[in-house]
Amino acid sequence: MNICVVGTGYVGLVTGCVFSDLGNDVVCVDKNPEKIAMLERGEMPIYEPGLEEMVKRNVEDRRLTFTQDLQSAVAHAEVVFICVGTPPLPSGDPDMTYIQEVAKGIAAALNRYKVIVTKSTVPVGTGNMVREIIETNRRRNVDFDVVSNPEFLREGSAIKDTLEPDRIVIGAPNQVVAMKILELYAPLERPMIITDVASAEMIKYASNAFLATKISFSNSIACICEAVGADVIQVIKGMGLDNRIGSAFLNAGLGYGGSCFPKDSSALARTAEKNGYDFKLLQAVMDVNKEQAVRFMDRLRVEIGGSFKGKTIGILGLAFKPNTDDMRDAKSVEIIGKLLAEGADVKAYDPIAIENTRQIFPQICFTRNAYEAAEETDAVIVVTEWNEFKLLNMERVKSSMKTPLLFDGRNIYDPLKMSRLGFNYHCVGRPSTVATR
Ligand code: NAD
């Protein structure tokens, strides 16, 4: 099938690449000339494990091409996937400008029947909006259909998630259109849900809001564990083994970040509000998430002597989660911002996300590895749970620090081991331990 994918970000590039790998002819469009130039040179604008090899293979086999020219890419396609960003506005609503821009572009290029598929995360009603924009702006009276096919991939495992999704959701105006999209996904042999457009749009928001709820619930339990001397990891393990609960996304830590959960939770809360429903539960989920890093930093401030002024803090991990270079709504941004505002010096290390962080904080010191980030510091904070931090030589880390104060925001170390190594160790939802040597 001839496919056009608009937007070559985490979703669009991976979607285009996987569809081409399944044998389709795919043209990926982006309005960012640098991204297209990079892709044409065989360089990836984002970090995603396995992506570069897959792109290379499909480009060489001429099933995958890149362009800035939306008009010709749409004109040649039977199916057009919209994968542009829907970033949050200050109101909490998603910014729909990019979707509207693409819908207008599609309208101008409409030359024969096409199925327009929205993969971006968009509020209920967007399918109708896209339909209206195309109807109003099309130059020829050509028919088309609009489908919602929300994306559930996770950065860091995006290719695997696209090839083996838990479910594929297709929200279509009728069965014939649904079958056309189903045909595209059939080779994956995964469970599919065929529904109406509004329900498909809602499934995405409800899923992300529920996952955010699991995280904030775990963090609330962690706060109580800290107060009563229980261990949240044991508590969560005990909960998660119950099949009705499940262990996924029951993690205590610094809270959720990234380009999806924060913005999708706010967007759903706004949809509820606009439709006269006060979604108190979701508001509490967002409040708990906001407080989590603040509480953690308050504890560090107390331990370090009441003020960050003049202190040097080492940061391990910058990306919003491991295996990605994405810094959108990363907890490190909030934490580093607070440290700088309160007069601390910051040394930071991340295996992949340093260049992206440099754009946000050019003034901080970036190191070549985790050990250098810990050298001569008054405290080290683990912000992202990269695997390479789990097996560090902690003896070496400790001996290079000014003060052996370790704040583990992701619970990756064993409190007893850390105290035996000589750290004053603080984590989330587990008792803190003091150095025993
Ligand atoms: P992104 O910011 O990484 O990529 C979006 C791309 O769209 C950019 O390259 C941008 O240049 C391009 N673009 C914007 N306007 C354009 C236009 N008019 N024409 C052509 N290109 C245009 O975004 P992303 O992370 O891939 O997310 C895309 C959508 O998918 C969002 O709605 C997001 O919520 C959703 N989503 C993201 C993830 C994720 O993990 N990143 C997962 C599921 C769903």
Image: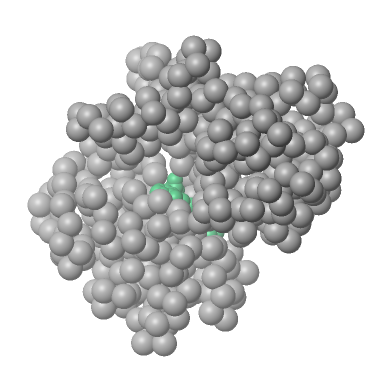
Q: Quadrant of the N terminus?
A: bottom left
Q: Residue 121, relative to residue 47: is it above or below?
A: above
Res. 149 in view:
yes
Residues 189 and 322: in front is 322
Q: What is the quadrant of residue 137 in the picture?
A: bottom left
- Outermost front residue: 437
| Residue 389 location (% of width, % of height) | 59, 51
| Residue 409 location (% of width, % of height) | 58, 35
Q: What is the quadrant of residue 206 in the picture?
A: top left
| Residue 89 location (% of width, % of height) | 56, 35
Give left or right: position of 243 versus 377: left
| Residue 289 location (% of width, % of height) | 52, 26
Q: Residue 143, relative to residue 342: is it above or below?
A: below
Kindly identify the residue that appears in the image at 10 percent across and 52 percent down: 175
Kindly identify the residue that appears in the image at 78 percent across and 26 percent down: 304
Q: Residue 289, relative to residue 180: is it above or below?
A: above
Kindly identify the residue that appears in the image at 48 percent across and 63 percent down: 48
